Image (spheres, helix red, strand yellow):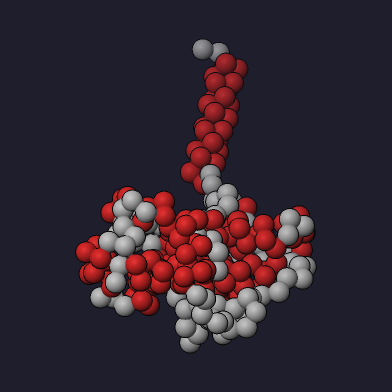
Amino acid sequence: MAPVQVAKFLVGAVVFLVVAIWLLARLATSGFNVDAQVMSKEAVAARLKPVGEAVASDAPPGQRTGEQVYKAICLSCHGAGLAGSPKFGDAGAWAPRIAKGYDTLVTHALQGFNAMPAKGGAADLTDDEVKRAVAYMGNAGGGKFTEPAVGGGAGGDAGAALDPNVAGKKVYESVCVACHGSGAAGAPKFGDKAAWGPRLSKGLEGLVASATKGLNAMPPKGGYTGSDAEFHAAVEYLSNSGK
C-alpha cells in the first residue's frame, strides 16, 4: 500500500473513531438536558413528597386555604410547570386558562385534565379545598377569583347543615341511586337494614369520611362533584334508610 493511501486510511480511521465516540456520548446523555428550574432543590423536594401528603398546617381537613393546598399538593407540578401545567405566577401561561372561567378550571381540577389526575392525586381534599387552590393559583396568574370561605359562610365547607331529606335525597336520586338503588358492585342497597347495619356502626362521620375517600368499587364521593355539605346530606339520607 502506498504511503499516501496509508495516510488517508489512518486519517479516516481517526475521524471515524471521533465521530463514533461523539455519537455514543450523545446517546449516553440523551434526556439529561433539563430545565434548571425543574431540578431546583425546591422542585425536587416537592416531587419527592408522597402524593396526597397532608398539608403542612394545623388546619383540619376541609378547612385548609388555597395557599396551604397549593404548597402541599399543587406545588409539585405547578411550581416548576411540569407536564404542561401552567407555572405558578406565570401570567402568560394562565391567561388563556383564566379566560375559560373559574367554573371550568374547577371542573378540570376536580375531575382531572390532561396529565393531572383528579384533585391533583389527593383524593382526601374536599371540593372546596380544591376550589380554593384553583382560586389561589389563578389569582397569582392574574385572575380575580374568590376563594370559598373557610369555616363556614357563603360557599364554605361547614355552613349550616343541609336537610338530608331534601338536599340529600336530591343527590341520591341523581348520582347514588346508580349503585345503591340496586346494590350493584357490593354497594349497600337503599333501605336494606341488614346491609347497612355493620356500616352504621362507624357512625355518620365515619361513613362520610369513607365515602369521601372512596371505598372498594366506589370512587371518591361516588363521583359526585357538588359541595361537601350536599354530599354529607346524601350520606346521611342513605344511612338513615338503613336504620
Q: Residue at x 43, y 57 (%)?
A: 176
Foreground residue, 217 or 24?
217
Q: Residue at x 45, y 60 (%)?
A: 172
The answer to whether residue 89 shows anywhere in this view is no
Q: Is residue 137 left or right of residue 167?
A: right
Q: Is residue 176 above or below residue 127?
A: above
Q: Quadrant of the C terminus?
A: bottom left
Q: Residue at x 47, y 78 (%)?
A: 61
Q: Position of residue 237 (x, y in %)?
A: 41, 69
Q: Position of residue 37 (x, y in %)?
A: 62, 63
Q: Is residue 27 above or below residue 13?
A: below
Q: Residue at x 31, y 62 (%)?
A: 191
Q: Position of residue 60 (x, y in %)?
A: 47, 83
The answer to whether residue 151 shows anywhere in this view is yes
Foreground residue, 197 or 63?
197
Foreground residue, 121 or 192?
192
Quarter holding residue 124: bottom left
Quarter holding residue 98: bottom right
Q: Position of residue 89 (x, y in %)?
A: 71, 68
